[in-house]
Image (cartoon, rainbow, N blue to C red):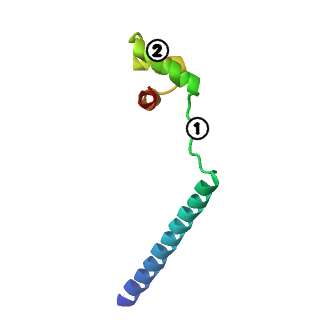
């Protein structure tokens, strides 16, 4: 009936408003953390030394992506990300 429809529309409006407020507060909190230097993200699986070694081994042409993933105990996408990251550092 029309009253039920109106009631659910009002509930949906408040739910949307609440989710927007949560999103806004989350963004503000992240901005404060970033300003304080506390927001870092996920740490790389490989150290700087391991990344350099992986790049060196890949550049020799003797190792495939699968070989490198197995040697360093990481996934193939991690190897690709590391190669892309170290490509810019060359």
Q: Residues within 10 Å of mark 1 (few under 14, many from 20)?
A: few
Position above or below: 49 against 29: above
Q: Could you tell me which quadrant the N terminus lies in?
A: bottom left
Q: Secondary structure at mark 1?
A: loop
Residue at the front extreme, as displayed: 90
Query: Which residue carries the number 2 mark?
Result: 57
Q: Is residue 33 left or right of residue 74?
A: right
Percent coordinates x, y for residue 88 in the rendering: 42, 31
Residue 36 in view of the camera: yes
Above or below, 89 relative to 56: below
Going 43% across and 77% down the picture, which residue do you hit?
12
* Residue 67 seen in the current view: no
Residue 7 percent location from the top left of the image: 43, 85
Residue 16, placed above or below residue 58? below
Residue at the (45%, 26%) spot, across then down: 79
Label of residue 43 in the image:
1
Residue 35 % position (x, y)? 60, 56
The reply to whether callout 2 and callout 1 are in contact (CB within 8 Å) is no
Instruction: Please report the residue visible at 41 percent of the width from the left and 16 percent of the height from the top.
Output: 59
Find residue 87 and report its image quarter: top left
């Amino acid at each position: 009936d029309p009253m039920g429809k109106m009631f659910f529309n009002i509930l949906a409006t408040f739910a949307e408003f609440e989710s927007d407020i949560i999103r806004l507060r989350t963004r503000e909190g992240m901005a404060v953390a970033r300003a304080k230097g506390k927001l870092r993200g996920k740490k790389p699986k490989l150290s700087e030394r391991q990344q350099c070694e992986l790049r060196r081994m890949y550049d020799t042409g003797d190792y495939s992506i699968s070989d490198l993933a197995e040697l360093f105990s990481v996934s193939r996408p991690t190897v690709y990300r590391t190669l892309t990251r170290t490509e810019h550092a060359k």
